[in-house]
Amino acid sequence: MTRDCGAWVNILSHMVKKRMNATLSDLGITGVQSRIMYYILEHCKDGPVFQKNVEEAFGLSRSTATGILQLLEKNGIIRRESVDSDARLKSLIPTEKAANLNAQIGECLRRTEQKLTSGLSDDQIALFQEIARKMYVNLEE
């Protein structure tokens, strides 16, 4: 049986999530939560990070992003602070717990990426990324 591109994307996505969730379960965080936490930690150095930034970076709906961020807040990984210029906006602030998890999560992300791309040349990886970006744009239209 041959699989179409959408099926392969779905299968790969499921496998990456499964591997990340298994690796991170001891830390009490899921793969998706870890990627978002990592994103917030990296981007808060450049200025405030808002829910809208997370939605755009990960292609999430508002309700999905809200649910993930609420869990991160409940688990003490981030906190939300009102912005002086607009009380409706909440800046996403990583906590000390997030900083402590950062190295372990970064290592998990690196190992997963290494396993995923093992045996592929730099050119093959670049081609895959180019194709994936084009597919994303195709679906956005």
Image (spheres, rainbow, N blue to C red):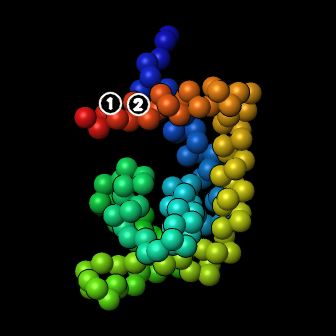
Q: Position of residue 12 (x, y in %)?
A: 54, 34
Image: 70 above or below 10: below
* Residue at screen point 48% across, 78% down: 93
Q: Quadrant of residue 51?
A: bottom left
Q: Is residue 73 visible?
A: no
Q: Disc 2 to disc 1, how far (Cα)?
A: 6 Å
Q: Nearer the viewer, residue 72 or 127?
A: 127
Q: Position of residue 131 (x, y in %)?
A: 47, 28
What is the quadrant of the C terminus in the image? top left
In the image, what residue type sits under mark 1? Asn
Q: Nearer the viewer, residue 89 or 12?
A: 89
* Residue at screen point 64% across, 27% down: 123
Q: At numbered mark 2, what does the secondary structure look like: helix, strand or loop?
A: helix
Q: Position of residue 110 (x, y in %)?
A: 70, 50
Query: Is 54 positioned to the left or the right of 86 in the image?
Result: right
The residue that mark 2 highlights is: 134
Circle number at residue 26: none
User: For mark 1, does the 10 Å Cα neighbourhood hold few (<14), some (14 to 19), or many (20 or more) residues?
Assistant: few
User: For mark 2, does the 10 Å Cα neighbourhood hold few (<14), some (14 to 19), or many (20 or more) residues?
Assistant: few
Q: Is residue 1 visible?
A: yes
Residue lying at the far bottom of the rendered structure: 84
The answer to whether marks 2 and 1 mark residues whose Cβ atoms lie closer than 8 Å is: yes
Q: At numbered mark 1, what does the secondary structure look like: helix, strand or loop?
A: helix
In the image, what residue type sits under mark 2? Lys
Circle number at residue 138: 1
* Residue at screen point 42% across, 52% down: 58
Q: Position of residue 83 (x, y in %)?
A: 34, 84
